[in-house]
Amino acid sequence: MRAFRTILAKDLRVELRTFESVPAMALFAVTAFVLFRFGLDREALEGSLAAGVLLVTVLFAAILAINRVFVAEREQGGFDAIRLAPVDGSALYAAKATALVVYLTALELVAVPAFALLFIDSWAGLAPLVPVLLLVNVGLAATGTLVSAIAVNSRARDLLAPLILLPLLVPVMIAAAGAAEQLLAAGGPSYEGLGRWVALLALYDVIFLLVGYAVYDFLLED
Amino acid sequence: MSADPALEPSQPTADPVTPQPAIELRSLRRDYADLPVLLGVSLDLARGETLAVIGANGAGKTTLLRVLGTLLRPTSGEIRVLGAALPGDAWRVRGRIGFLGHEPLLYRELTVRENLRFNARLHGLDAAEEAIAGVLRAAALTRYADEQVRSLSAGTLQRASICRAVLHDPELLLLDEPLSHLDPDATAHASRLIGARPGRTRVIVSHDVDRALAEADRTLALRADGTVGYCGPAAGLSPGDARAIYAGRDR
C-alpha cells in the first residue's frame, strides 16, 4: 500500500502541476459534443443515441490520458526508479489505474453537465448514470493501464495503444450503452433489466483488474 | 596484460566463514537483438571492494551496470549479486542497490526534495526527512531542494541524482560516470556521498582511467566488441595498458 500511495500521490501532484491530461480530455469532450450537436442537427438526444454520443466521447477522451499514463515513467526514468526499489509491479499498476479513474471522473464532472446542457431534456437519468460511469471508468482504467504498459516502449505507441485497446473495450461499451440507453430513455429512466448490464460491467472490471495484477510484474521486465 | 589465471574467478565455496562475494559473474553474455554487447564476462568482487569498469564507447559498460542493477536480463551466464541469483531472485536485492546511470531518474516537474521523498517512500525509509536533509547537505544542494528538477543545471542535476542513488544507504553502488558535469567543488561534495566506506561495494564506470584505477581495488577492462581485455587487481593494469585496450591494441 505504501508504494501504491506514493506513486499515486506523485502522479496526481504532477498532473495538478502540469495539467497535461485532464484539461485536454475535458476540452476534447466538450468540443466533440458541440460538433455532435451541429453534425446531428439535434437539440435533444435520448435512448441509444444519447448513450452512444456520451460514451464514445468519454472513450476517445480517455485514450488521450491512456496514451500519456506512462510518458513520464518512460522519458524520465520512472520505470527504472521504481524497479530499483523493493516494490511489487502490481503497486505501479494499481496506482496508474487509480490515477486514470481520478482523471476520468474529473473529466466527467465537466463532460456530463456539458452533455446534459447540450442534449438532455430530462435530467432524471443522470444521477443513476453515475455508478454506471464509475464502472466504465474502472474498466477503461484497468484495460488502458495494461495496454499502455505494453505499448509504451514502442515508437508507434500513440497508434498501437488505441488499436489494441478499442477491441478490448467493446464489451464495456456494449454493457455501458445498454445501461445508459435505459437511463437516458425518452420519458425518464427505466430500470428493468439494468442489473445485467451493470453486472456485466462489474465482471469485466474484475477480470481486467485481476489480469493486470497478475501480469504487470512481467510487463515491467525488459 | 591478459587476465592472470590466478585471478580467474573460482567456483563459489561452501566455506561458511568466507563471506560471499558481493558480485559473482560466470560467462555473462548480453545481446541486443542478435548483436552481442557483453561476451564471456566472469569475475568475483568481494564485499566492500570497488570495481572500475573501463572500455571504449559501446563496449558494454552501461549494459553491465544495468544487468547488475536488475534492470536488464542477461542473455546467458550466471549472476549473483549480494547473494541473489539474477534475474530470478531480483526481488531480493532491489532496495539494496544504488544506481546512478545516464538518466537522472528524477521527475522534472517535481522538486529535488519531492523526488527524494518519492524515492525514500518507495524504499520504505523510516527517517526519510532526516535522510533527505543529510544527503542534500552533503551534496551542498540544500538551496536547490525546492527547485523543480527541470530548472537545474547539468551539474546540479547530477548531484541530485547522486542523492537519489545513495539516499537509502545501499550496500552496492552502481555508478556510471558519476562525476560527469561536475566542477571540482561539486566533485568533492559528490565524492563524499559515493566514496568508499566499510561494507559498501562499488562498481564505477568511467572514462577517467587514471582516477578509476587509483580508486579501484579491481578493474574490468572491456574491449569494443564486449569481450574482457583485463580482469584483475587494479594495480595489475597500467594506464597505458588500459588505453591500449580502449584502442583495441592489446591483441
Image (tube, rainbow, N blue to C red):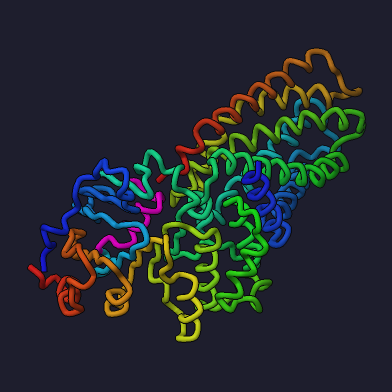
Residue situated in front as seen by the camera: A221 or B171: B171
Residue A162 as seen in the image, left or right of residue B203:
right
Please state the horizontal and vertical placement of residue B143, each as a whole percent of the image: 66, 79
Where are the magenta residues, as a range?
Answer: B59-76
Please state the horizontal and vertical placement of residue B61, each as a whole percent of the image: 30, 62
Residue B13 as seen in the image, left or right of residue B132:
left
Residue B44 as seen in the image, left or right of residue A27:
left
* Residue at horizontal 72 percent and vertical 34 percent from the top: A55
Dividing the image into 4 quarters, which one contains the N terminus of chain A?
top right
Q: Is residue B66 magenta?
A: yes
**Farthest residue toward the top?**
A193
Q: Quadrant of residue B140?
A: bottom right
Residue situated in front as seen by the camera: B217 or A126: B217
Q: Is residue A156 magenta?
A: no
Res. A61 visible in picture: no
* Residue at horizontal 83 percent and vertical 25 percent from the top: A183
The number of callouts visible is 0
- Taking B114 as reference, is A71 above or below it? above
Please state the horizontal and vertical placement of residue B170, each as a whole percent of the image: 48, 58
Res. B225 visible in picture: yes
* Residue at horizontal 45 percent and vertical 43 percent from the top: B92
**Farthest residue toward the left?**
B251
Residue A186 as seen in the image, left or right of residue A36:
right
* Residue at horizontal 87 percent and vertical 32 percent from the top: A126
Q: Quadrant of residue A146?
A: top right
